Image: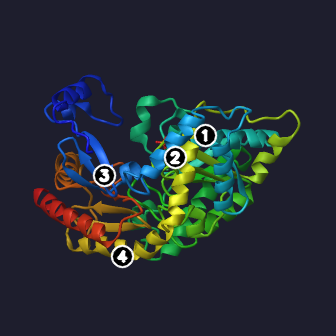
């Protein structure tokens, strides 16, 4: 039976405003407006407390791969909770964590065979940085501790992960953060001209990729190779609106990391588990990182879980007599979450979800590219079921919105209008203004068309408001 919140809705609204501290939320915007309250999910759709239906164009928050309302996942959680609700992984193990670690080791590229569970993505990023520092201390390179990451990239909100994040606007209010992180340019080919200071215009994507990767070597040289421990990069960078790697980028990054003995951390909190049509980013773009950080799609959001997957060589020094990685989380590798993840990955295989993404990604792209006839659409970019649409004021000059226009158009109109038209997705201006799309992996042409049609109406109107 569908949940009916109608009678309780006024109370829920008031209690949300009085007591619930929402994340990354301007609470002032709800002073004279209702908080959207989502009560149900079914397949690729979610429903609010009034019973209105929305296409979940963001899979929650890049999370729900298999779709909503999967009773088999709820049952896997219930079964595990009634058998063993909790036991930590601190010197003990339980079958679901063991089986999931083995499964992930089998799915991950190359020698990535050691799985450290966390509660979410930011914790996986923290864990990777701590591992990198600890590893180099154990192998006799104790100065190696610094981290390089890309401009505008988001890696989480804990103080270490936030320090690695390349978004000054998210960091300033919490400074000083953990020292020793440095930024290099990202791979926004559409803006290659301004990123390279006019050196390259992005028409030769390979040359731009080579240039961008080489900036990592420049940063390592500037900081001193003996002091740099790791480079954190997403397979396709999310913040800024989906920057795929130009051809050859990852291969050059791998070469640089090998040359300077710097660990390559592939932050796949969004990109792993089918988002790009492969299990991991390395399989999409042909590289093998030293560490993968992951979360989100691992359970499709039916329970919280993150995983750092490290290569055998990184664990080796910790296997010596008396050694340990002195790090952990009470809920990392929770029995219910790991049991849910196992069932989730089983669904991926039974329903061939990776194949669904691979065979439909070209159609997703071409459907979104139809929007390029709208003068407000500057660029459509992405990979798999992960796309960003950059909005511009002037397509010829690529002129972006002013701060005021972002407020008025992006937040004041586009965000609300998309939702009102029945599409839940995200309008974001952490870089240039973009619409972010990341639907559940079960969708196909029908949903692509629905996304395109709603975007067309809303973006067309948005341009007229400029
Ligand atoms: C690339 C990346 N890393 C880390 C994180 C942080 O994950 P969490 O919110 O689970 O801590 C995110 C979250 O969106 C992310 O996209």
**Mark before the other along the chain sequence, 2 or 3:** 2
Q: Element at badge 2?
A: helix
The residue labelled by disc 3 is 426
Q: CA distance from mark 2 to mark 1?
A: 15 Å
Q: CA distance from mark 4 to mark 2?
A: 34 Å
The residue labelled by disc 4 is 363
Left or right of residue 331, residue 39 in this image? left
The residue labelled by disc 1 is 333
Q: Residue at x 63, y 45 (%)?
A: 96
Q: Residue at x 39, y 49 (%)?
A: 61
Placement of 38 over or under 326, stated as above or below: below
Q: Nearer the viewer, mark 3 or mark 4?
A: 4
**Mark before the other along the chain sequence, 3 or 1:** 1
* Marks 4,1: beta carbons within 8 A: no
Viewer-proximal residue, 450 or 351? 351
Viewer-proximal residue, 106 or 96? 96
Left or right of residue 71, residue 395 in this image? left
Left or right of residue 166, residue 459 in this image? left
* Marks 2,3: beta carbons within 8 A: no
Placement of 397 over or under 308, stated as above or below: below
The residue labelled by disc 2 is 76
């Amino acid at each position: 039976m569908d949940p009916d919140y109608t009678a309780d809705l006024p109370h829920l609204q008031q209690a949300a405003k009085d007591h619930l501290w929402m994340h990354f939320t301007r609470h002032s915007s709800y002073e004279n407006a209702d908080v959207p309250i989502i009560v149900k999910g079914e397949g690729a759709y979610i429903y609010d407390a009034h019973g209105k239906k929305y296409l979940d164009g963001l899979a929650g928050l890049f999370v729900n791969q298999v779709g909503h309302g999967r009773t088999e996942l709820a049952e896997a959680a219930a079964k595990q909770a009634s058998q063993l609700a909790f036991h930590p992984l601190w010197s003990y193990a339980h079958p679901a964590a063991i089986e999931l670690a083995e499964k992930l080791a089998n799915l991950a590229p190359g020698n990535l065979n050691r799985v450290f569970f966390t509660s979410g993505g930011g914790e996986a990023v923290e864990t990777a940085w701590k591992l990198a520092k600890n590893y180099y201390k154990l192998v006799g390179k104790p100065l190696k501790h610094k981290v390089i990451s890309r401009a505008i990239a988001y890696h989480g909100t804990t103080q270490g992960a936030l320090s690695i994040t390349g978004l000054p606007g998210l960091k300033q209010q919490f400074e000083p953060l953990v020292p020793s992180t440095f930024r290099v340019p990202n791979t926004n080919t559409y803006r290659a001209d301004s990123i390279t200071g006019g050196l390259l215009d992005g028409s030769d994507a390979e040359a731009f990729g080579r240039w961008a990767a080489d900036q990592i070597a420049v940063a390592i040289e500037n900081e001193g190779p003996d002091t740099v421990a790791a480079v954190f990069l997403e397979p396709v960078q999310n913040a800024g609106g989906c920057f795929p790697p130009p051809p050859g980028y990852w291969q050059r990054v791998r070469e640089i990391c090998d040359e300077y003995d710097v660990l390559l951390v592939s932050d796949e909190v969004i990109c792993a588990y089918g988002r790009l049509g492969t299990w991991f980013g390395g399989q999409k773009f042909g590289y093998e990182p030293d560490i993968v950080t992951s979360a989100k799609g691992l359970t499709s959001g039916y329970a919280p879980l993150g995983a750092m997957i490290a290569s055998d060589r990184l664990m080796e020094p910790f296997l010596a007599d008396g050694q340990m990685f002195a790090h952990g989380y009470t809920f990392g590798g929770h029995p219910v979450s790991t049991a849910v993840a196992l069932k989730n990955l089983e669904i991926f295989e039974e329903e061939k979800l990776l194949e669904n993404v691979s065979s439909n990604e070209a159609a997703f792209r071409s459907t979104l590219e139809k929007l390029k006839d709208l003068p407000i659409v500057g660029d459509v970019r992405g990979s798999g079921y992960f796309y960003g649409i950059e909005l511009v004021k002037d397509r010829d000059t690529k002129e972006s919105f002013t701060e005021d226009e972002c407020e008025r158009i992006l937040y004041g109109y586009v965000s609300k209008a998309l939702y009102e038209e029945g599409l839940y997705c995200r309008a974001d201006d952490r870089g240039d203004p973009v619409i972010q799309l990341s639907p559940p992996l079960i969708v196909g042409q029908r949903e692509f068309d629905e996304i395109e049609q709603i975007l067309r109406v809303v973006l067309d109107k948005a341009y007229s408001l400029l």
